[in-house]
Image (spheres, grey):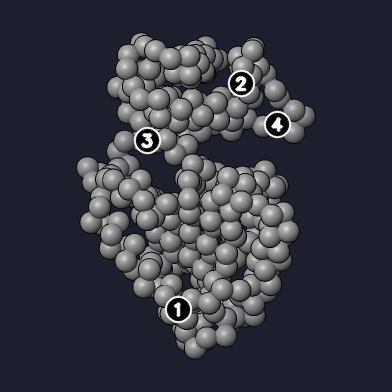
Amino acid sequence: MGQREQRLRTIIKAGFTLLNDKKGYSQRSVVKKLNMLGLNIGAASFNKIIKDKAVSRATLQKVAEAIKELVMLELGYHYEEERGFVQAITADWQAKVVPELSTEEKDNSGLQFHTEGRVSIEYKRNFFHNTEKELIEVGVRLHTFTNYFISRNPTEYRKPIEQLLEKGVTIKLFLLDPESNAARLYFEDRTRIFPNEKHAIEETRRVVEKLAFIKRDFDQQDLKGQFEIYTYKHIPQNHFLIVDGDSLHGKMMTSHYIYGLRRAECPVLEFTRKDNRSLFRKYWNAYTQLVQGAKPL
């Protein structure tokens, strides 16, 4: 076993020991929490790591990064090469208990169904934190996305997005063109049930202005990645959040807009190309057709 692999195992074992001692978490509980953070690993593989059995370096790397994040979130310890896990609680630090991802939430096709609607900012952030090349979000107004930059602490959303750009990830945002006939028809129809949407076109224009300001700010930093904004002119059908969609390890969350429901309440489907190639291909094709002809800001 090489020194690199041994160092990664040391991080994982130390993190698990700390979680077990401080929280009483079993290996199974820790695995479920790591999977909630976006890792895809089974209990058997985690046990192999703990017992020094063979696993790939890539798996060790992913598990080590995830367990460092879990220990920091729940216990306030960060990892140092010389000292191991060290308490690093600041005055404003608050423990965040990561829920355990129940295996019952997925069927045998790897499909996960978030029945309550829009996922939390923490879940969304963990979903895209390991993006390698491209992160895509398609919405109607992207009002919530924009507010994450303006009204939330930068560490919650802006900083993770900036970190992706720093490592060269391209981020593409698509929203409905407020000047299009599609926008007028869509929001007129929505107003019949939700009267407050009668001002949606004006609000979308304001979102466009805010996104343009955010883009200029990132552009001025001369980051390796690109922050791109586009408008499309089709009647909105669903929301997309896609991580590395054109790769073998692509994953996606999508939410269909159900008439009579607020968009935030519409259930969310989550799946990967690896687990469900047919379903992924259908939604990937729908995304590519939707954004054909989209205009950059």
- Front residue of 295/94: it is 295
Label 3–label 1 contact, CB within 8 A = no
Amino acid beneath label 1: Gly
- Tell which tag, 4 or 1, sits nearer the viewer: 1
Residue occupying the point 67% across, 32% down: 94
Q: Could you give the CA–CA distance between mark 3 and mark 4, rounded to whole angstroms?
A: 28 Å
Amino acid beneath label 2: Tyr
Residue 203 seen by the camera: no
Q: Could you give the CA–CA distance between mark 2 and mark 3, rounded to whole angstroms?
A: 22 Å
Mark earlier in primary sequence (3, 4) = 3
Q: Is residue 119 above or below residue 204?
A: above
| Residue of label 4 | 93
Residue occupying the point 45% across, 31% down: 62
Question: Is 40 left, or right, of 21 in this rendering?
Answer: left
Amino acid beneath label 4: Trp
| Residue of label 2 | 79
- Local secondary structure at mark 3: loop
Q: Residue furthest right?
A: 91
Mark earlier in primary sequence (2, 4) = 2
Residue occupying the point 44% across, 39% down: 38
| Residue of label 1 | 293
**Residue 211 location in percent, x, y?**
65, 66
